[in-house]
């Protein structure tokens, strides 16, 4: 009798192992995506980008969203973005136009977690200058300021879909150059020192210092 029970247990363990090999456990994964992810726009246009959340049917407690963009060619309309209906409580919502960063933090009401797919937020952009505008969801691992999708203390965010827009200008358009803090040691226009972050539309600008612009800002 004991031998039969032992053989039965061993057979059940073997079958369970086979099932696990055939149908492996799927890890929880969440995605943040920007829509539209591409498209042509012209200087002066205003368009809306939607950030969508997909929790892969897992209940979540909240989302921290960090987005970086190039402020020399795109301008966020307003000091905040528009939260969607996915999560009801907004803990933080602000735009830093000098460095091109958007921060949104939202949480669920206790006992009413979110699961599924839905719009997390909408961002209204205005095109300032021509060029390629990358709008990037920051999900760098190990950073204190990064995007995450929280569930019971775990970060489920495993993938993001960023956006890249092609921005054009009409013939004869004179682009403005914006110099965020720290990119140049000093710059002058008509013998006047230009404040950091100023917008310059003159055709002659004399620069002193490092003219490289790793963030892709336009200097013309």
Image (cartoon, rainbow, N blue to C red):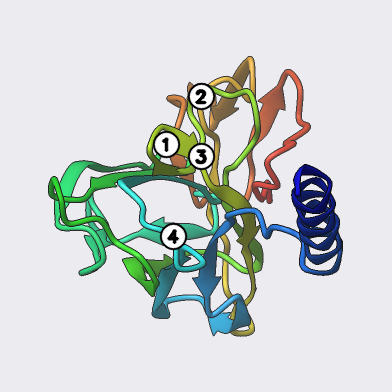
Helix, strand or loop at label 3? It is strand
For image coordinates 73% across by 18% down, the residue present is: 209
Residue 40 at what x, y percent from top left? 61, 84
> Closer to the observer: label 2 or label 3?
3
What residue is shown at x 17% (from left), y 56% (from top)? Answer: 112
Q: x, y (%) of residue 71? A: 49, 49
Question: Which residue corresponds to mark 2?
Answer: 181
Residue ID for mark 4: 58
Give how far apart the Cα atoms at labels 4 and 2 are.
Answer: 42 Å
Q: Nearer the viewer, mark 4 or mark 2?
A: 4
**Looking at the image, residue 209 lies above or below residue 82:** above
Point out residue 100 in the picture as x, y percentages from the top left corner. 47, 43
Q: Which residue is mark 3?
A: 155
Compute the Cα span from label 1 to label 4.
36 Å
Farthest top residue? 185
Mark nearer the viewer, 3 or 1? 3
13 vs 172, nearest the viewer: 13
Q: Which residue is at the far front? A: 1
Counting residues from the N terminus, which is met first, the one under dot 3 or under dot 1? 1
Q: Are marks 2 and 1 in contact (CB under 8 Å)?
A: yes
In the picture, measured across the screen, residue 176 lies left or right of residue 15, that is left
Residue located 26% across and 47% down the image: 106
Q: Residues within 10 Å of mark 4 (few under 14, many from 20)?
A: some
How many other residues sit within 10 Å of disc 2, few (<14), some (14-19) or many (≥20)?
A: few
Q: Is residue 121 visible?
A: yes
The span from disc 2 to disc 3 (Cα, nearest Å) is 33 Å
Q: CA distance from mark 4 to mark 3?
A: 12 Å
Image location of residue 153, percent across then percent down: 41, 32
Q: Secondary structure at mark 4?
A: loop
- Residue under circle 1? 98
Q: Residue at x 44, y 69 (%)?
A: 52
Q: Earlier in the sequence, mark 2 or mark 3?
A: 3
């Amino acid at each position: 009798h004991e031998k039969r029970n032992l053989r039965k247990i061993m057979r059940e363990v073997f079958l369970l192992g086979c099932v696990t090999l055939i149908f492996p456990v799927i890890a929880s994964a969440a995605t943040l995506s920007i829509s539209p992810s591409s498209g042509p726009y012209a200087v002066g246009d205003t368009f809306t980008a939607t950030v969508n959340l997909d929790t892969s049917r897992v209940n979540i407690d909240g989302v921290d969203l960090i987005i970086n963009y190039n402020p020399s060619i795109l301008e966020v309309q307003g000091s905040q973005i528009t939260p969607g209906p996915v999560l009801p409580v907004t803990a933080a919502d602000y735009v830093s136009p000098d460095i091109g960063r958007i921060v949104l933090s939202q949480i669920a009401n206790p006992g009413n977690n979110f699961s599924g797919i839905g719009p997390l937020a909408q961002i209204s952009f205005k095109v300032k200058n021509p060029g390629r505008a990358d709008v990037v969801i920051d999900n760098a691992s190990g950073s204190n300021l990064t995007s995450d999708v929280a569930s019971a203390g775990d970060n489920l965010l495993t993938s993001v879909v960023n956006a890249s827009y092609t921005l054009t200008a009409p013939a004869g358009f004179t682009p403005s150059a914006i110099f965020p803090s720290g990119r140049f040691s000093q710059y002058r226009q008509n013998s006047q020192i230009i404040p950091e972050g100023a917008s310059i539309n003159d055709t002659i600008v004399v620069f002193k210092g490092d003219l490289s612009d790793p963030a892709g800002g336009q200097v013309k």
